[in-house]
Every structure is written in C-alpha cells, then in structure tokens.
C-alpha cells in the first residue's frame, strides 16, 4: 500500500506553509535587489562579473550578524574587504591616485599597475582561502 512520505497532520502542514511563505517572500526580495544589477549586465566584460560579486559579498556581509558561527566577525570583514577590492578594481582610479603622489612621471604608471595587480592578488588569496568558510 502506498503511503505519503509524511502524514498530513497540523504539526507538519503549518511549518510547511510557513516555509513556503518565506520562500515566496525571499524570492520577491531577491528580485527587487538583483533587478537593477542584472538589468544592465552584459557577458563581454569582467566588470559586470565584479559588480555582481561585489553586491553579493556586501549582502552576505550584512547578514553575517544572523550567523551562528564563531567566526562571523572575521568572515564579515573578509567579505567587506573583497567587495572593496572589487569596487577599487572596477573604478580603476589607480593611475589618478599614483599621479597625485608621483606627478606625471613614468613611475606613476608602473605604481598604478603594481597596485592593481596587488589588489587582484589579494582578492584571489582571500576568496581562494576562505570561500568555503563563508556559510551560515
């Protein structure tokens, strides 16, 4: 005889309805948050991927206050640092910053490229080392 996987009792129906409501609520919230970012997304430039990753890391960092893990503060700081590095890479103001320090010397260009490479490497190290640690 066929039996359903669980019995249809009030103690099982009520939590399932609540879970469905939360799924719908979070789905609409995600649409509202992601629509402005994804509307202007394109597949041909790394900057669009950086914008998506930056937004996701910022939202994850905001929600680490609800996490129940011991390393929540450290994870939040790592996510904020990664999102800031992505913002700096996207804005690409390295040459302007180097010119303020070096003037129009050739060293300004080399310093700006070195800083951009360092930011990319630092971002890669943080994500490569701690990505699997950022969970709820």
Image (cartoon, helix red, strand yellow):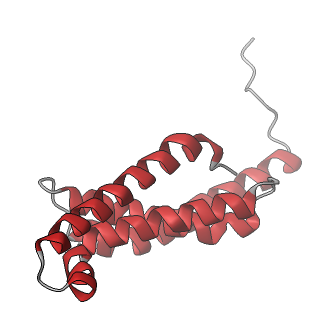
So how many labels did they put on this image? Answer: 0
The image position of residue 100, as x and y in percent, is: 25, 88
Quadrant of res 1: top right
Question: What's the residue at 69%, 55% (across, down)?
Answer: 19
Left or right? Give the position of 135 relative to 79: right
On the image, the x and y values in percent for residue 11 come to 88, 49
Would you say 22 lies left or right of 4 here? Answer: left
Residue 31 location, quadrant? bottom left
Q: Is residue 29 in view?
A: yes
Residue 127 position in % (x across, y down): 49, 48
Q: Nearer the viewer, residue 100 or 89?
A: 100
4 to 16, vertically: above or below: above
Which residue sits furthest right?
11
For image coordinates 58% across by 45% down, the residue present is 130
Q: Residue at x 55, y 41 (%)?
A: 129
Q: Position of residue 27 (x, y in %)?
A: 50, 62
- The answer to whether one can see residue 21 in this image is no
**Front position in the image: 122 or 38:** 122
Residue depicted at 73% across the width and 64% down the height: 73
Left or right: 72 in relation to 45: right
Q: From the viewer's perspective, is 15 left or right of 128? A: right
In the figure, residue 95 lies in which quadrant? bottom left
């Amino acid at each position: 005889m066929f039996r359903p996987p669980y019995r249809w009792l009030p103690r099982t129906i009520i939590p399932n309805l609540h879970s469905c409501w939360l799924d719908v609520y979070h789905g609409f919230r995600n649409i509202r948050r992601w629509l402005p970012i994804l509307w202007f997304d394109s597949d041909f430039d790394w900057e669009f991927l950086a914008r998506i990753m930056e937004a996701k890391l910022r939202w994850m960092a905001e929600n680490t206050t609800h996490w129940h893990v011991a390393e929540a503060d450290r994870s939040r700081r790592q996510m904020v640092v990664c999102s800031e590095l992505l913002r700096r890479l996207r804005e690409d103001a390295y040459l302007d910053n180097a010119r303020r320090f070096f003037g129009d010397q050739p060293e300004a260009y080399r310093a700006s490229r070195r800083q951009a490479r360092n930011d990319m490497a630092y971002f890669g190290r943080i994500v490569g080392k701690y990505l699997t640690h950022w969970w709820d």
